[in-house]
């Protein structure tokens, strides 16, 4: 396949000196154009984009600044926090254990973690943890600063938390609790921490630069996250709940984070912690590689990660609702993955990345997904967070350009 080398000067004055580097197959140049447009027309500081098709790279580009204030360029090996894209990696760990027969995702959580049965959670299954119907999307008691980085503290609190609804009857995004809940099951079944298991069974076999718990030796490569600027007025129901309803699930998920949001985004403590819901650190190349394997039935270029049948069941829609009790928009989840959530006709935030596709969005705009129909693995990461509950304009621009290419005769 012919690959074009990329070296594009950016037009925005605030990114003076910034460039796009990498390579792109000629037929995918419209996607590269969309990536450049994010810098020229929108709020991009630094970002990476990668697409694999049939296990081969067709786009691998990066540009801008890993730290705009320090004028530190985004390099080939720059990595960054990808927030809820981490959930898919954590879920994959659980499904790998299920594929081996060590874990049954329809078994009750208390079978593996007896203390979790407290406060009426005895009937919660692993699947409910994965599809956000378990009823434990947030903690009611305020967390002390630093609690998010203490695994034992968090799983003890979650084991003792009462559910917000009868488990399995409603859906509410488990924005941070997902990582400790699913991660503790992985830890108990595998006998390894979540981050160790992910490295051994996914990241290392696929040669991915993806970490759940970053070693200090890699810290210098991490891009600086710039949080989105708060809106003067709430833009959606989720932001309204944060502003006006302190006891709401939305508010507690967003504010009661034990030191993670936002100070943990750029701290060594935050990067080192195994935050399986939101603390994964990687780049587009590695996200695309993981999803490439999943788009091909669980095996990429001779490296088997998970069995096809287990993967197909994991990717099936498992829960859906017209109003997620946390995000306050319609959502659709597989067992740990997001499915396409096209709410545009209702004027609500969306995550539109193909009806056959499954993946995840990350806070601020990052995205990874697999499209089995097109045999595509997609990854996009950035360090300037945008607004919106699901995807914002940057990732949407990229996915629309990609499907424009894929749907050509």
Image (spheres, helix red, strand yellow):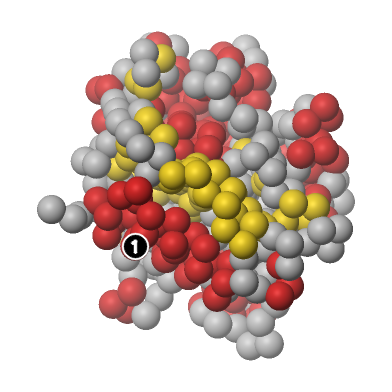
Percent from the top left, x then y, of residue 133? Answer: 43, 48
Decide if residue 114 is in sight here.
no
Could you say which is closer to the camera, residue 395 or residue 151?
Answer: 395
Q: Secondary structure at mark 1?
A: helix
Above or below 170: residue 81: above
Within-10-Å neighbours for mark 1: few <14, some 14–19, many 20+: some
Could you say which is closer to the camera, residue 185 or residue 159?
Answer: 185
Percent from the top left, x then y, of residue 277? Answer: 60, 43
Horizontal placement of 11 versus 73: left or right? left
Horizontal placement of 310 versus 395: left or right? left
Above or below 345: residue 4: above
Q: Which residue lies at the image location 70% right of the left edge and 49% below the top edge?
A: 74
Above or below 362: residue 184: above
Which residue occupies the extreme left position in the image?
409
Percent from the top left, x then y, of residue 366? Answer: 54, 54
Horizontal placement of 74 versus 238: left or right? right
- Residue 343, by quadrant, is bottom left
Could you say which is closer to the camera, residue 291 or residue 58?
Answer: 58
Decide if residue 289 is in sight here.
yes
Above or below 318: residue 309: above
Residue hosting label 1: 400
Percent from the top left, x then y, of residue 221? Answer: 76, 39
- Residue 119, by quadrant, is top right
Q: Which residue lies at the image location 50% right of the left edge and 25% below the top edge?
A: 93
Q: Quadrant of the N terminus?
A: top left
Q: Which residue lies at the image location 86% right of the left edge and 58% below the top edge?
A: 70
């Amino acid at each position: 396949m012919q690959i074009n080398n990329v070296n594009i000067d950016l037009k925005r004055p605030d990114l003076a000196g910034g460039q796009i580097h990498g390579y792109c197959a000629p037929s995918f140049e419209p996607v590269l154009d969309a990536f450049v447009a994010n810098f020229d027309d929108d709020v991009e500081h630094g970002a990476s984009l990668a697409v694999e098709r049939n296990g081969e790279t067709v786009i691998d580009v990066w540009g801008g600044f890993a730290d705009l204030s320090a004028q530190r360029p985004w390099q080939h090996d720059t990595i960054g926090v990808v927030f809820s894209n981490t959930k898919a990696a954590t879920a994959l760990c659980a499904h790998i254990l299920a594929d081996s027969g060590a874990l049954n995702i329809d078994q009750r959580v208390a079978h593996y973690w007896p203390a979790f049965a407290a406060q009426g959670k005895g009937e919660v299954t692993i699947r409910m943890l994965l599809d956000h119907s378990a009823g434990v999307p947030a903690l009611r008691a305020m967390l002390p600063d630093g609690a998010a980085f203490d695994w034992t503290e968090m799983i003890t609190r979650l084991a003792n938390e009462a559910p917000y609804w009868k488990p399995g009857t409603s859906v509410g995004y488990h924005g941070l609790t997902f990582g400790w809940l699913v991660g503790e099951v992985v830890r108990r079944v595998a006998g390894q921490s979540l981050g160790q298991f992910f490295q051994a069974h996914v990241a290392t076999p696929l040669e991915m630069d993806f970490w759940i718990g970053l070693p200090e030796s890699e810290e210098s490569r991490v891009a600086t996250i710039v949080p989105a600027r708060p809106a003067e007025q709430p833009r959606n129901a989720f932001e309204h709940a944060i502003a006006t309803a302190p006891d709401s699930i939305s508010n507690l998920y967003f504010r009661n984070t034990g030191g993670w949001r936002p100070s943990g985004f750029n701290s060594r403590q935050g990067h080192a912690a195994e935050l399986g819901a939101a603390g994964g650190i990687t780049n587009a190349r590695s996200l695309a590689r993981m999803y490439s394997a999943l788009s091909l039935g669980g095996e990429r270029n001779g490296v088997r990660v998970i069995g096809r049948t287990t993967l197909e069941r994991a990717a099936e829609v498992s829960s859906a609702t017209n109003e997620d009790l946390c995000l306050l928009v319609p959502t659709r989840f597989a067992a740990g993955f997001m499915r396409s959530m096209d709410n545009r006709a209702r004027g609500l935030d969306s995550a539109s990345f193909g009806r056959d596709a499954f993946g995840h969005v990350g806070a601020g705009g990052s995205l990874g997904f697999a499209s089995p129909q097109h045999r595509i693995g997609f990854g996009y990461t950035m360090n300037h967070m945008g607004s919106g509950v699901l995807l914002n304009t940057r990732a949407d621009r990229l996915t629309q350009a990609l499907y424009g290419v894929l749907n050509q005769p």
